[in-house]
Amino acid sequence: MIHYLVQRVAILCLLAGGLFPASALAHGNVTLEEDTCVRRIGGNMVHFSAYQPQHEPKAQYCTEIPEDGDTFLVVDLIDQSLRNLPLGVRIVKGQGEGGKDEDDQTVAYWKPASHPDGVVRGEAKLEKGVYRVIITAEGLSPSSYLLRVQQVDYSKFGRKAVGPIMVLLVLALIGYELSKGGRLRRWFGSRRTAP
């Protein structure tokens, strides 16, 4: 009976690892090319970060910003060649690519300027909703980030729930197997009759 139960639990764990490999592996460090906060502007890499020290002093965000309010936005110019080009940033409310309709909804704009230190800094007051950060460099195609401010990301929620759900399923299976064999009833029954 115990051998059968262990075999079932092992099969369940293998299935969970196969169906949800991200939950079975540790995150670890990612390379610059795999970092979701890195984009390319004409072949040159930039890294975007957002900070809200009034809510969480040490937290760094990329595209999912948990609270609304004052937000410090930083674009790190990874490649040296971008540091001498005039580079500008526009934050637009909505998901548009910065066309004429979205220009009326610009919430922050930093005029193009060169940044020899490799860092573009600014601040914007972001309300709950979706924004697009558009980064432009002279002579290069623009790049953008979609920011979700105080929005629920159901895919992340689902990935985080997989582990606890699997534990509950395994415990339910163990409980079912024990109760089916009568061992659970005998164990509780013997505990009650003991002096």
Image (cartoon, rainbow, N blue to C red):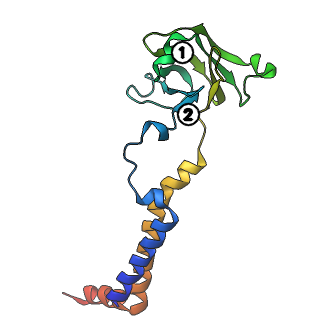
Q: Residues within 10 Å of mark 2 (few under 14, many from 20)?
A: some
Residue identifier under label 2: 63
| For residue 146, above or below residue 81 | below
| For residue 115, above or below residue 185 | above
| Residue type for callout 2 | Thr
Residue 175 position within the rendered picture, expressed as x and y whole percent measured from the top left: 41, 79
Foreground: 53 or 176?
A: 53
Q: For mark 1, give the secondary structure.
A: strand
Residue 184 position within the rendered picture, expressed as x and y whole percent measured from the top left: 35, 86
Q: Which mark is residue 123?
A: 1
Q: Residues within 10 Å of mark 1 (few under 14, many from 20)?
A: some
Please give the name of the residue rendered at 42% of the width and 71% of the height, measured from the top-left corner: 13
Please give the name of the residue rendered at 72% of the width and 27% of the height, measured from the top-left corner: 97
Foreground: 26 or 9?
A: 26
**For the C terminus, which image quadrant?**
bottom left
**For the N terminus, which image quadrant?**
bottom left
Q: Quadrant of residue 29?
A: top left
Residue 67 position within the rendered picture, expressed as x and y whole percent measured from the top left: 54, 30
Please give the name of the residue rendered at 55% of the width and 22% of the height, measured from the top-left corner: 69
| Residue type for callout 1 | Glu
Q: CA distance from mark 2 to mark 1?
A: 15 Å
Residue reaching furthest left?
Answer: 195
Tell whether label 1 touches label 2 (CB within 8 Å). Answer: no
| For residue 33, above or below residue 138 | below
The mark nearer the N terminus, 2 or 1, is: 2
